[in-house]
Amino acid sequence: MAKRIKIVGSAIRVEDTVLGKIELDEPSKYMWYDSNKLDNGEILFLEKDGSKNSYIGTLKIPLANAVNSTDTPFTDETFRTFVAENLGK
């Protein structure tokens, strides 16, 4: 099962491409990712914890199962570009 990662308005949404279930729907300005996990083939989304000004892990997806809004598989490079253009702003 692939996980579709896309921006909807000002939110990042992750949905299961088979079941249509939304697994993550959060304001993109509060989200980031773990670069070290991505180096190992995993996407770990991090959400800013405002009370501590730190980040906590919220959702982990194998990179091999991640696709963009057009169902094109992400690579580590294209996912980093997606993050730089859309998250934490």
Image (cartoon, helix red, strand yellow):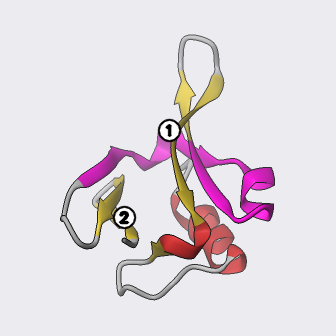
Quarter of the rendering containing residue 3: bottom left
Could you say whether the residue bearing mark 1 is in a helix, strand or loop? helix
Residue 67 at x, y percent in the picture:
45, 77
Against 81, residue 84 (above or below) is above
Given the image, on which type of amino acid does mark 1 rest?
Tyr
Q: Position of residue 86 (x, y in %)?
A: 51, 62
Image vertical order of residue 53 relative to residue 29, above or below: above
Q: Residue at x 32, y 49 (%)?
A: 23
**Which residue of the protein is positioned furthest toward the left in this rendering?**
20
- Mark 2 lies on a secondary structure that is strand
* Quadrant in the rendering for residue 52: top right
Residue at image mark 2: 7
Give the amino acid at mark 2. Answer: Ile
Mark 2 and mark 1: span between their CA atoms?
13 Å
State the residue position of label 1.
30
Where does the magenta region start and end?
22-45
Q: Residue at the spot x=57%, y=70% of the render?
A: 82
Q: Residue at x 63, y 29 (%)?
A: 55
Residue 79 included in the magenta stretch of the image: no
Q: How many marks?
A: 2
Q: What is the quadrant of the N terminus in the image?
A: bottom left
Count residues near mark 2 (Cα–Cα under 10 Å), then give few for <14, some for 14-19, many for 20+: some
Q: Is residue 23 magenta?
A: yes
Q: Nearer the viewer, residue 14 or 50?
A: 14
Instruction: Tell me which label, 2 or 1, sits earlier in the chain.
Output: 2
